[in-house]
Image: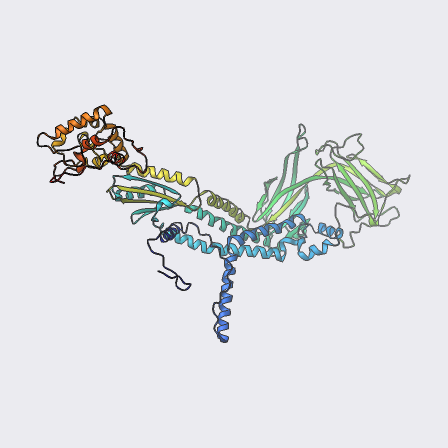
Amino acid sequence: MSKTTADSPAETPADSPRADSSGDDQDLGAAGSQLSTAPVETAMPGSFGGNRRPGLTGWLAWTGREALGWARWMWRQLTSMRVALMLLFLLSLGAVPGSLIPQSGTDALKVSEFQDAHKTLGPIYQKLGLFHVYGSAWFGAIYVLLFVSLIGCIIPRTWQFVGQLRGRPPGAPKRLNRLPAYATWRTAAEPEQVREVALATLKKRRFRAHIAGDAVAAEKGYLRETGNLLFHLALIVMLIAFAWGQLFKSEGDKLIVEGDGFSNTLTQYDDFKSGNLFSDDDLVPFSFNLKNFIGTYERTGPNRGTPSTFQADITYSIGAYGKSEKHTIKVNEPLEIGDSKVYLVSHGYAPVVTVRDGKGNVVFHQAVPMLPIDSNVTSQGAIKVLDGYKNAQGVAEQLGFAALFVPTYAKGSGTMFSQYPGLDYPVLNVTGYHGDLGVNSGIPQNVYQLETKNLKQYKDSKGKILKAQLLPGETMKLPNGAGSITFDKQIKEWAGFQVVQQPGTTWALAGALTAIVGLAGSLFIQRRRVWVRATRGADGVTVVEMAGLGRSESAKLPEELGDLAALVHDRAPTKTPDGPKSADASKTADGPRAADALKTADAPKTGDASKLADATETADATATADGPKTPADASKTADVSQPADESRAADASKAADASTTDDSPKTADGPKADAPKAADAPKTADVSTTADASQPANAPKPPADDPNTPNSDADTHDSDSGVEPPVPAEGAEK
C-alpha cells in the first residue's frame, strides 16, 4: 500500500487511466505547441529572492535577486499584449482633448478666449497641459511606453518565429482520434506506400511536411504569424514616422491676390507653426507668382452655387536663380517641391479701391482681400490707409473703412447677402472712420478687422452715420472735404495656399498599408497541423489515420482534412472485403458457427461434405463468392438458409441417411454425435445439419445488429433452446 506525503508524492502506475490521460494531455500539448509566438501571461509572484542567508552578504544577494526578478516580471508585463492594448487605448483617449479643447499650437487666439471665458477651468487645463496635448509630458510618456512595449514584444517573437521556420512540425500524438478533425480507413496498400502518398499530397498542397516515425507530420499557415509580426512592425514604423513628422514639420498659410507672389521665408507667411526640432534652414527654397485664378460654379439644379472648377495658374522657380516654370494647382492636386507641398485651400474676392484726400491726391490704391462668411461668398474686410493722408486742416490722420462685399446682390432685398458666388451683380458697402488705427502700438491686429477704439466715425450733414453701397465705378465723398473713396471697376480674385513640409509621410503611409495587410493575414489565415499515420493492423491490413489541429476551432479545418483524406484515399483506397466462394459456402453456411466458417472459407475441403448438398441447397443459393464476411452478415446468411418448419425434419433425415453411406462420418440427433473425419477441415464444417435438426423451428432469434448478439446463429439457437452443442464422438479425429 503506497503512502502519499507532501515530500514524497505517490507514483501513478504507468498503465493506469490517470497516467494515460496525463500522457495524452502532454502529447496533445506537444502537438499544439508553438502554433503562436504570443507571449505567455504570467501571474504576479510573491517573491523572487528565495531563501535569504544570514548576514549582510546574504541580504545583498537576496535584494539583488528580488530586484532583478521584479524587473524581469515588470518587463514581461510591459511587453504583453494586454498592456500594449491598454497603452494604445490611453493614447487614443489622450487625443480626445486635443480635438475638443483649443490648442495653442493651432489657434492661440482661441486658447486666450477660452481662458478668459473660463476662469476656473482655464488654470486647471493649463496645469494639465490640455492646451498643448501632443506636446505634454503625460502624452509623450504614453507614446514612449507604447513604443517600447511594441519593440519588446516583437523582437523575441521574431526570433521565435524564425526558429519555427527553421524547425520541423512536431510528430503525431499517440491518439489521433482525440483531435478535433479525424478520419480513418483500412487499405490494402503498404504503410510505406501510404506515407509516401500522403507526403506528396501534403507538399502539393503547400504544407511543410516530413515523415516522423510511422506518420507524416505537416504544417501550414505560417503567413498568419507573418501577418501578425508585420502588423506590429507596421505599428512601430507608423509611430516613428508620426514622431519624426511632428518634430520636424512646418505648416504655413498665405493669401495671395492675382498678380502677387510668394517666397518661402518665415516673413512671407500670414500664419506659421512648426515642430520642436524644426529650424529655418529646413525650409525648401522656392517662390511662385499667382497669375490667374479660375473659379466656376453650378448655375442650375439642386447643386446651384457648388464650385465646379477651382484652379490657380502659377509660375514657380526653385532656388535664387532657378528657371521659371508654369504649373496649375487644383484642389487635392498640390505642387510638390522637394519635401514641401503647396495646397490650394481657399478663394475669395479682392475689390480694387482708390482713396483720395481733400486735394484729390491718391493716398491708397490697391486690391483689398475680403474674407467669405458664407457659401455664396458674402465677404467682409477692412480698408486701412496708414500713411500719406492729411485732413482738410492739414493734420496727418489714418483712415479706416469697414467693408462688406457681395458678388451677387439681391435688388430690393435691402440686405447685404450674396445670392450666388459668381460676380453677377457686385456691390461694396463701406463705412468710414478717421483717427488712430493703433497699428503703431506694437500690439498685433487682425488685418481684416478695424480696431475702432481710437477712431471716429464719419457722419453726414444730418448727423447720421456715413455709409454707402457702391457699384463698380461709384464714389463716396467724405464730409467737410475730407476726401473720397472709389470702388473701381476692376475686381481681382485671391487664392489661399498652405505650404506643408512634413517628413515621414511616405513611411507612415507604407506602415499603414502594411498594417492593413498584416492584420488581414492574421485574421483570415489559419495556422494548422495535419498528421497522417499508416500502420499495419493485427490482421495484416494497413490502418490509415488522419487528424488535424488548428490554433483555434474553425469549420474549415474538417473540410480541408476531408479534401486531403479524399486525395490520399484515391491513391490508397479502402480494402473491399472478399466473401467465400459459392462451393465453400455450401459446405458451411448451415453450420452452428457460420461466421467462423466464412473466415475459414479457404480451408481444405472434405469429400464427404459434398453429400450434404441436398441439406444445404438454400445456403448454396444465397452464399456467393462475394458474400459477407462480418459476423452479423454471416448470421443473416445462416438464417436465410434455414428451411421452413415442414421441411426441416426431412432435411435432417436426408443428412443422416447421407452420412451413413460411402464411409462418411456418422452423426446423431443427440448431443453426442459423431464428428466428421477430415484431417484439415474445421470442426464446424460437417455438423451443420445436426445443429439444424436439434434446433426448434420457431426458436426466438436476437436481432443481428444487437451488440450482445453472438458471432453466429448456431450459438444463439444452442443457448436459447437449452440444447448443448454437439461434441465429437469417442475415437473421432479432432
In the displayed structure image, the side of residue 148 where residue 370 appears, left or right? right
Q: Is residue 540 above or below residue 13?
A: above
Find residue 532 and report its horizontal and vertical position in percent.
Answer: 32, 44
Q: Would you say residue 667 is visible in this rendering?
A: yes
Q: From the viewer's side, name the closer residue of 252 and 70.
A: 70
Find residue 543 and report its horizontal and vertical position in percent.
Answer: 29, 42
Residue at the extreme left: 662
Query: Which of the 4 image quadrants contains residue 278?
Result: bottom right
Task: State the count of labels.
Answer: 0
Q: Would you say residue 278 is visible in this rendering?
A: no
What is the quadrant of the N terminus in the image? Answer: bottom left
Find residue 116 and report its horizontal and vertical position in percent.
Answer: 76, 52
Residue at the extreme right: 462
Query: Which of the 4 image quadrants contains residue 462?
Result: top right
Find residue 704 and report its horizontal and vertical position in percent.
Answer: 30, 33
In the displayed structure image, the side of residue 386 where residue 731 appears, left or right? left
**Color scheme of the displayed model:** rainbow
In the displayed structure image, the side of residue 611 where residue 14 appears, left or right? right
Residue drawn where x is 72% and y is 54% of the image = 122
Q: From the viewer's side, name the closer residue of 685 and 250.
A: 685
What is the quadrant of the C terminus in the image? Answer: top left
Q: From the viewer's side, name the closer residue of 236 and 3.
A: 3
Residue at the extreme bottom: 55
In the displayed structure image, the side of residue 525 where residue 573 appears, left or right? left
